[in-house]
Image (tube, rainbow, N blue to C red):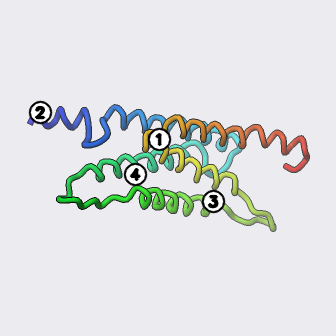
């Protein structure tokens, strides 16, 4: 029994516990940066929402990797990574669409809905172990949210 417990605390089937934790932590940190920007603008989806979406997406990928490592007998493989990505994308898109509304003839919260969708993609990247790629995407998102807003103000379009 003791050996079994040691195995559970050090690794899963495919992704070691420490690696899984670092991936989840990466999803938290990267999405928090985006969530903080949205929070500072008092948008409906802020810090916590972006973190939760990203961590959920990350977890789905890690769980998918674990399921893929299970032996279902023979050559049977019951996990398709593309289906998981599609499911996460569809779920987050549903949440993001709920944020977007029309008021007095203007559409509002499109950027926040999109940033939430991107937080999901960043979580997927972290879960797949692509922390550098997820970090680059988060950086680009922050540049778009922060710097382009200033450019829009200078141009008088915002």
Q: Mark 3 vs mark 4: give the one in front.
A: 4
Q: Earlier in the sequence, mark 1 or mark 3?
A: 3
Q: CA distance from mark 1 to mark 4?
A: 11 Å
Q: Mark 3 vs mark 2: give the one in front.
A: 2
From the viewer's perspective, tell me whether residue 79 is left or right of residue 24: left
Task: State the residue at coordinates (44%, 46%).
Answer: 58
Task: State the residue at coordinates (49%, 44%).
Answer: 125
Near mark 4 (Cα within 10 A), the count class, few <14, some 14-19 or many ≥20, is many
Q: In this view, which residue lies farthest toward the front?
A: 75
Q: Mark 2 vs mark 1: give the one in front.
A: 1
- Looking at the image, do the residues carrying marks 3 and 2 touch, with CB atoms under 8 Å apart? no
From the viewer's perspective, tell me whether residue 97 is left or right of residue 13: right
Q: Is residue 141 above or below residue 113?
A: above
Which residue was labeled with disc 2? 3
- Looking at the image, do the residues carrying marks 2 and 4 touch, with CB atoms under 8 Å apart? no
Residue 81 screen position, x and y as percent = 40, 55
Element type where label 3 sits in the image? helix
Q: Is residue 2 above or below residue 48?
A: above
Q: CA distance from mark 3 to mark 2?
A: 48 Å
Which residue was labeled with disc 3? 99
Q: Quadrant of the N terminus?
A: top left
Q: CA distance from mark 2 to mark 1?
A: 30 Å
Q: Earlier in the sequence, mark 1 or mark 4?
A: 4
- Looking at the image, do the residues carrying marks 2 and 1 touch, with CB atoms under 8 Å apart? no
Q: Nearer the viewer, residue 113 or 26?
A: 26
Element type where label 1 sits in the image? helix
- Looking at the image, do the residues carrying marks 1 and 3 touch, with CB atoms under 8 Å apart? no
Task: State the residue at coordinates (30%, 48%).
Answer: 66
Q: Earlier in the sequence, mark 2 or mark 1?
A: 2
Which label sits on residue 60?
4
Which residue was labeled with disc 1? 126
Residue 14 screen position, x and y as percent = 29, 42
């Amino acid at each position: 029994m003791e050996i079994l417990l040691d195995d559970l605390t050090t690794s899963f089937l495919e992704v070691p516990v420490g690696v899984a934790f670092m991936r989840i932590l990466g999803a938290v940190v990267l999405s928090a940066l985006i969530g903080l920007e949205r929070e500072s603008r008092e948008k409906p989806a802020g810090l916590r929402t972006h973190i939760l979406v990203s961590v959920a997406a990350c977890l789905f990928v890690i769980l998918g990797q674990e399921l893929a490592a299970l032996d279902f007998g023979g050559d049977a493989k019951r996990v398709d990574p593309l289906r998981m990505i599609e499911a996460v994308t569809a779920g987050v898109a549903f949440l993001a669409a709920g944020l977007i509304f029309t008021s007095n003839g203007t559409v509002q919260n499109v950027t926040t809905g999109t940033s939430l969708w991107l937080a999901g993609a960043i979580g997927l990247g972290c879960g797949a172990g692509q922390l550098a790629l997820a970090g680059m995407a988060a950086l680009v998102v922050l540049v778009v949210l922060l710097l382009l807003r200033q450019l829009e103000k200078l141009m008088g379009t915002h």
